[in-house]
């Protein structure tokens, strides 16, 4: 055969070779998800919904190739099982407080459990290689064979001194080792100090690694020490490098006249902001103008961070590293230095600012007739706190009463359309602490989203949606490339939703899902029923936990919770790196500049999604610490509470008066010997069969607080 014919033959077989490779990937996923399965080509074909005979033959060929690669065993003719003795998997450790852990493997639905004895020095967050093995009871577990990448060698905890040595007792209950610290490596730390330390060595045959103190954070219970500990533990940056600070200080708040000429000047259009009363970083503003045809021109103006933070600079690299701002109870760890976040970029009242805007012509029913995207210069005439705007909506007289009421009416129409399209009717709520001059919590404030919040929310959602549509379907022509960052939210897992329905049943609500298409409608009906009940907050919170997590991706799958086919983050570039990148991409598109990012955007998506999770964990832990501080002088007092969680070690109760959550251990529940029934999802007494369920009202007494564990200990009062 000639070379020419050979090339033709290879070209012809290439698609089949590629398809077989895809088949092998799909088959691996099937066996990984169910390591005990014994399957033939017919079983595989059914799972992959392959019906034609030619493709089924390819499935059999793929199975045989996987056997020759050592991935599968053929235990009888045509029947295959996973070769557990020759299966290396790589994943991330999600450790438990008991020493074992689950290995999260990308592309595999079920995590692999590894017992404490088989962890082999793997710690929480490490990337490890594991082998699978089958236990006598038939269950498959894993054993760590290699720690490929240690997540961190830095740990936060308290110093416990002995005569000749010390230990660093780590804060993180998922880190099941303490660091052995020689006295000469204490760096001045004293008994009980909260410190940051690092592993220096871990000799074979030694249970605890050797370490040294790298920084003394302060005394346990002090706000600064605890907040720094939380930030360090979650691998979040605390201070800016000097070169970033120097670059930020050089940024001028004076606008350049030549730059203004390149932008749409909207300084003469009425513009205002609505934000929390204590906000300093104003990302967004709204402008409003009545047009001659009776329609309205509404501008959604966003701080033009991309003008100041150029790609590849020190500020940009630091912003990328952080991914987002982190909001602890008593402080903000900003993504950008304050000279930018609170001054140069912030849309402060009575100042000219560079902005990136979405301007729409819209009628009073929320119908959009025209839209425009571009760089602008704006001037904020007024600054409202949410509370101020809410008072106007509730009939307080104000200079901008007509404008705010008009925008509020349009926002309600936009929200109604979203809900009709299948969006989830989830209303944000927030529990915040009021702090005194010493940083001590003196009051708990429960904030529920009102019309003023929803007004801003709807117009921000509109801007995010329209930008995503413009880039994703540029000029009406769908693009298949992935040169964009979407904010996506996958459809819910029906099994998790059915578990949620079991949970809701504990409150007396009958919720039976017939299929995914009914989920949002039925959930919204449930939210409407419970809106004014004490259990609403808990039900809404559990519903959110039952859903997939929203993430940043370059492949668009839509946003289920918002019922949007296209959605992105455009409106908060001061505090989210994703928005900054979206600004750059949109600007390039508007100027017909095509940029091929390769894998860079996908890597950015993974990184900022991970950073977002870290910030969420830190914010949650910060809240728990201040809950403990708030009730520390209330030990011995009794409160009515709602059962908010059940586990094999006890139950959690959220106190109705202060929204603080504590734990009742299983052995302390009075009147019987109680156990957790996983099938009924209830705690049941062995002798008298009394039950504790989600949503039950109980009277509890605070019997202790633990600032180290950030835990409130409760007992049930009979």
Image: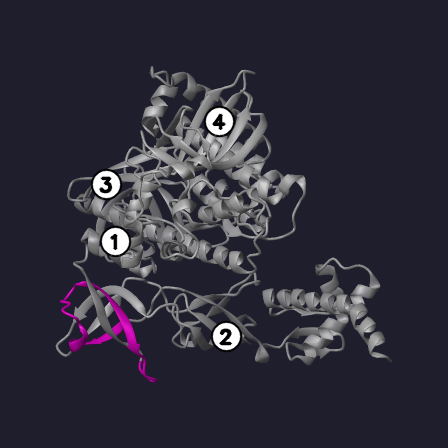
| C-alpha gap between disc 1 and disc 2 | 35 Å
Q: CA distance from mark 2 to mark 4?
A: 56 Å
Residue situated in front as seen by the camera: 231 or 523: 231
Query: Farthest residue in the front direction?
Result: 258
Q: Nearer the viewer, residue 50 or 376?
A: 376
Tag shown at residue 227: 1
CA gap between label 3 and label 1 equals: 29 Å
Q: Which residue is mark 2?
A: 130
Distance from Cα at disc 3 to Cα at disc 4: 52 Å
Earlier-in-chain disc, 2 versus 4: 2
- How packed mark 1 is, by other alpha carbons closer than 10 Å (few <14, some 14-19, many 20 or more), is many
Camera-nearest label, 2 or 4:
4
Closer mark to the observer between disc 1 and disc 2: 1
In the image, 45: left or right of 336?
right
- Marks 1 and 2, the one that precedes in the sequence: 2
Horizontal placement of 644 versus 504: left or right?
Answer: left
Q: What span is colored magenta in the figure?
A: 179-206
> Residue 134: in sight, yes or no?
no
Q: Quadrant of the C terminus?
A: top left
The residue singled out by tag 4 in the image is: 298
Label 3: which residue?
638
* Residue 670, position as x, y percentages in the image: 30, 50
Of all residues, the one furthest to the right in this rendering is 1
Q: Are marks 4 and 1 in contact (CB under 8 Å)?
A: no
* Dot in front, 4 or 1: 4
Residue 156, image quadrant: bottom left
């Amino acid at each position: 055969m000639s070379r020419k014919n050979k090339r033709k033959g290879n070209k012809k077989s290439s698609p089949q070779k590629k398809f077989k490779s895809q088949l092998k990937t799909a088959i691996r996923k099937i066996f990984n998800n169910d390591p005990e399965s014994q399957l033939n080509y017919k079983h595989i074909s059914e799972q992959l919904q392959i019906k034609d005979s030619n493709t089924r033959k390819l499935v059999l060929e793929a199975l045989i190739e996987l056997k020759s690669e050592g991935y599968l065993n053929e235990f009888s003719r045509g029947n295959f099982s996973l070769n557990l003795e020759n299966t290396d998997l790589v994943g991330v450790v999600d450790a438990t407080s008991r020493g074992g852990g689950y290995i999260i493997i990308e592309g595999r639905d079920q995590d692999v459990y590894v017992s404490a004895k088989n962890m082999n020095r793997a710690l929480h967050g490490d990337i490890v290689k594991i082998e699978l093995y089958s236990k006598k009871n038939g269950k498959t577990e894993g054993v760590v064979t290699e720690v490929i990448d240690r997540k961190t060698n830095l740990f936060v905890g308290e110093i416990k001194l002995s005569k000749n040595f010390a230990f660093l007792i780590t804060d993180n209950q998922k880190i099941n080792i303490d660091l052995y610290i020689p006295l000469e490596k204490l760096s001045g730390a004293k008994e009980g100090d909260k410190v940051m330390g690092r592993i220096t060595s871990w000799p074979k045959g030694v249970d605890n690694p050797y370490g040294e103190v790298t920084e003394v954070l302060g005394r346990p219970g002090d706000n600064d020490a605890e907040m720094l500990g939380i930030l360090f533990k979650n691998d979040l940056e605390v201070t800016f490098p000097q070169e970033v600070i120097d670059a930020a200080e050089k940024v001028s708040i004076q606008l350049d006249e030549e730059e203004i000429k390149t932008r749409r000047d909207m300084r003469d259009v009425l513009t205002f902001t609505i934000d929390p009363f204590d906000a300093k970083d104003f990302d967004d503003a709204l402008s409003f103008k009545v047009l001659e045809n009776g329609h309205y021109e509404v501008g959604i103006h966003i701080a033009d961070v991309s003008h100041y933070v150029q790609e590849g600079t020190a500020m940009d690299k630091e912003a990328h590293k952080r991914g987002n701002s982190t909001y602890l109870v008593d402080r903000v760890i900003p993504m950008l230095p304050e000279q930018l976040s609170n001054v140069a970029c912030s849309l402060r009242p009575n100042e000219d600012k560079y902005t990136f805007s979405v301007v729409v012509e819209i009628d009073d029913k929320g119908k959009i007739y025209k839209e425009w995207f571009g760089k602008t210069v704006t001037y904020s005439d007024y600054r409202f706190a949410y509370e101020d705007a809410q008072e106007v909506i509730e009939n307080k007289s104000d200079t901008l009463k007509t404008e705010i009421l008009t925008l509020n009416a349009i926002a309600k129409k936009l929200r109604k359309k979203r809900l009709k399209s299948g969006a989830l009717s989830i209303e944000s709520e927030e529990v915040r602490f009021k702090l005194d001059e010493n940083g001590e919590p003196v009051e708990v404030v429960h904030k529920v989203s009102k019309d003023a919040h929803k007004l801003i929310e709807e117009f921000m959602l509109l801007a995010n949606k329209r930008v995503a549509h413009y880039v994703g379907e540029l000029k009406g022509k769908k693009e298949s490339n992935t040169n964009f960052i979407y904010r996506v939210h996958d459809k819910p897992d029906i099994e998790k939703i059915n578990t949620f329905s079991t949970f809701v049943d504990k409150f007396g609500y009958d919720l039976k899902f017939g299929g995914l298409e009914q989920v949002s409608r039925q959930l919204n009906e449930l939210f409407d029923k419970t809106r004014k009940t004490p259990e609403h907050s808990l039900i809404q919170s559990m519903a959110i936990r039952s859903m997939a997590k929203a993430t940043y991706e370059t492949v668009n799958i839509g946003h289920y919770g918002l019922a949007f086919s296209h959605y992105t983050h455009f409106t908060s570039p001061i505090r989210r790196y994703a928005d900054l990148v979206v600004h750059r991409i949109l600007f390039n598109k508007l100027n017909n500049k095509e940029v091929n990012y390769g894998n860079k955007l996908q890597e950015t998506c993974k990184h900022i999604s991970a950073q977002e999770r870290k910030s969420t964990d830190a914010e949650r832990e910060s809240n728990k610490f201040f809950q403990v501080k708030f009730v520390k002088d209330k030990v011995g007092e009794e409160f009515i509470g709602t059962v908010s969680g059940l586990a094999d070690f006890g139950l959690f109760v959220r106190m109705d008066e202060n929204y603080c959550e504590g734990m009742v251990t299983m052995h302390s529940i009075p009147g019987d010997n109680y156990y957790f029934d996983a099938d009924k999802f209830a705690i049941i007494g062995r002798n008298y069969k009394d039950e504790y369920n989600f949503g039950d009202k109980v009277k509890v007494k605070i019997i202790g607080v633990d600032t180290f564990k950030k835990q409130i200990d409760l007992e049930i009062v009979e």
